[in-house]
Structures are given as structure tokens and as C-alpha cells.
Amino acid sequence: MYYDIKNDKKIIIKESSALKFLYNTLIGRLLLKIFTTKFVANTYAKYMNSKLSKRKINKFILKNNINMDDYEEKDYTSFNDFFMRNVKSGKRKIEDGLFAICDSKLSVYKIDENSKFNIKNSIYTVEELIDEKRDYKYALIFRLCVDDYHHYIFPDSGKVINSKYINGKLHTVQPIALKKYKVFHENSRQVTFLDCDNLGDVCIIEVGALIVGKIVNEDVKSFKRGDEKGHFEFGGSTVIMLLNKDIEINEKIIEMSNNDIETIVRMGQNIGR
């Protein structure tokens, strides 16, 4: 279930029958061991980067009700080229305060004094996510679906301290998988530590997902608020932002997160202060 914060209503979403098969049956779980490998992701990526994949574009737009008026006009060379499309100038305005760093379904969790937090009844630690001990107070989980704009931006001005890649599997980031596996700990991910002017110590983690192994980040040492940080290639995935500063998140987002309901947000939309 999602929460549409703009229209103050809940939206019921049906789980994929294919994902139910993969995660809820014995045969499915055996196949899952194959589908979550880099080999499968890379093989599928070759097709999605080919001219043959162009035929999927129009059907995908209709199925997911994508408003193409938001995006720059272009003659796409492949489905992946379409998937990495750019929005038109002014279509993702950066609002004041703390804002969503990408189009996504957002959940926010408080991290306790032991650096632990709970997602879908799975206990995570900061150390599991970033492979080192650090203190943070909040975890913001931005889960991108296939119909979302798959670019993400910096939350503040500042500089990059360092970054690293953690190898892993490629589970889907859909709720059905989050209930079965510690996906954000098991999946491949890119970790970047930031020193921000207003937010201070920030860590951003891009998590690869089923059939989405490729995370493409900008090679920068410093950045301005709202600058592009990077993008994902085909599929749905997740960006996790860890904050060490005391912040005030929109009460409705907190209420929904506490009830395992994700809030629909758009890049640049205010989510707190």
C-alpha cells in the first residue's frame, strides 16, 4: 500500500504474481538463486541496450501511465536509453527545507542508540549497510519503482569525503522481498560519505536490484544542493540516506512509515526540515 500525500489518500497496490512465485514457492526460490546473480543482470542489460528493445517503450509508457510531457523529447536508441531519460527543466523544482532526493516511495526510520532500525520486521544495523561503524540518527529509504524517474540528486551543498562499492546479490527491492530477506544488506550497493554544509555528516547508499546491477554516479568532489548525483539503469531500486542531524520529518510520512505504508514523493518535494 502507498500513501498519496498530495491528495491525502491510500492506494492499494497488487503484488506481482511473478514475484510471489519467486519468493513464496520452493521452485521459485531455486530460480531466484540464478536470477539474483550478476551474470543474469549483465545478460539482460545487453538486450535492454540493444535496438531490439526499442519495441518495449510504447507498451511500457501505456502500462505505467507515464506522463511523457515531463521529459525531454528524444529519439531513443534502446529501452535503457529511454529508461535513463531526462526531465525537462523546471519539472522537478527543489523546495525549501529537507527534500526528496528522487522520485520514489519513501519510508523513514529512527535509528536507535545501538545503530539499529527495523524495516518490514527485519532488524538492520548501520554497520551491515555500510560495512563500517558510524553513528546516524535517521534512515530515509527511497524505493524507486520501474515507472519512477531513475535519477537522484544531492540533498545539500558540500563535498564528497569518500566512497566505496560493496559487492552482493541483486534481489528485487519490492516489499515481498523485504519481508523475506535483508535485501539492503545482501544486495550490491554503492556507499558515499558526504560532508554537507547544513546537514553535516550524510551517507547515501544506492542499492542495486533484480536485473539492475548498474549504478552510475557522477565523478565529483564537491556539489551544490540539487546537483545530480547519479542514476540507475533499467529496473527498480533504492537510495538510502543516513542522517546524523536532528530533523523534523512530515508527520504524515512518519505515521505511514510506522504502519509499513510508503509515501509517494517526487524529486525536490519537501519532506521535512
Image (cartoon, grey):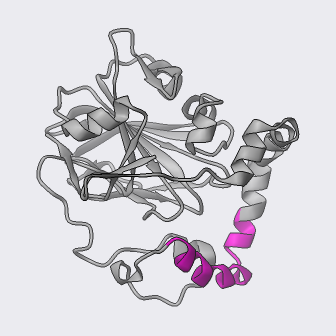
Against 92, is 52 above or below? Answer: below
Q: Is residue 176 visible?
A: yes
Q: Main secondary structure of the magenta part?
A: helix
Against 242, is 69 above or below? Answer: below
Q: Is residue 36 visible?
A: no
- Picture quadrant where residue 176 is located: top right
- Picture quadrant where residue 229 is located: bottom left
Asked if the stretch drawn in magenta spans residue 56, the answer is: yes
- Residue at screen point 15% across, 57% down: 95
Q: Considering depth in this image, is 192 or 22 the residue closer to the camera? A: 22
What range is drawn magenta here? 45-64
Q: Which residue reaches farthest top?
A: 114
- Picture quadrant where residue 51 is located: bottom right
Q: Using residue 173 as the reference point, say whether residue 26 is left or right of it.
A: right
Against 43, is 8 above or below? Answer: above
Q: Considering depth in this image, is 112 or 48 the residue closer to the camera? A: 112
Q: Considering depth in this image, is 108 or 219 the residue closer to the camera? A: 108
